[in-house]
Amino acid sequence: MADENDPIHEQAPIDYRAMAEFRHALSAYLHESNTLLRQAGFTPQQFACVLAIGGQASGEMSVGALARELHLTHHAAVELSQRVEGAGLLERFRDPGNGRQVLLRLTPHGRQELGRLALDHLSELEGARATLITTLNRWQDQLRVVRRQQRRSP
């Protein structure tokens, strides 16, 4: 039998339903995203690569930064960037300031494809938006309660 004086029982109950709904909405969005990508001839990793580079203010990214952004090993990021380059979506070039570093930038075709796919993804995200926002707000409310309780406890 659980001790009711146990600090775990003093905390606000965790809203598992909100967690489940958020994960479901996110999973559904990613499933639809992957379907859109396959129909367009992209893999999810290729799209993540193009999106990561396209999201840089400079429009360029090092292979090492791409590896960190996508949680890949350096070797896997090199292979991915070579495949995406082979598809005509990016170009690889030596950093003029550091000849050992390889930089990546989208080709005009890569920017065009990213723009087209981004619009498709925005439409898909619109459908998941309400559930994602609602469940995130529920988590934020719960986090406030838990933090208040933590400040009160010795």
Image (cartoon, rainbow, N blue to C red):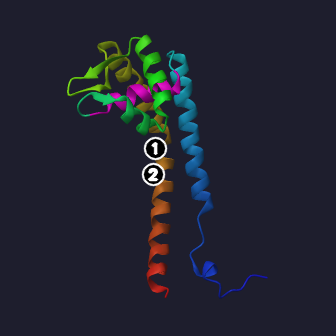
Q: Which residues are magenta?
A: 43-56
Q: Give amino acid for label 1.
A: Arg
What is the quadrant of the N terminus in the image? bottom right
Q: Residue furthest left?
A: 97
The answer to which of 23 and 137 lies nearer the viewer is 23
Residue at (29, 33) in percent of width and height: 56
Q: Main secondary structure of the magenta part?
A: helix
Residue 19 vertical position relative to residue 49 in the rendered view, above or below: below
Whether label 2 touches label 1, CB < 8 Å = yes
The answer to which of 86 and 24 lies nearer the viewer is 86
Q: Quadrant of residue 69?
A: top left
Residue 37 vertical position relative to residue 131 in the rendered view, above or below: above
Find residue 133 and name its label.
2
Residue at (52, 27) in percent of width and height: 44
* Structural distance between the alpha carbons of marks 2 and 1: 6 Å
Image location (x, y in percent) of residue 130: 47, 47
Image location (x, y in percent) of residue 107: 31, 15
From the image, tell me which residue sits under label 1: 129
Image location (x, y in percent) of residue 40: 49, 16
Give SS at disc 2. helix
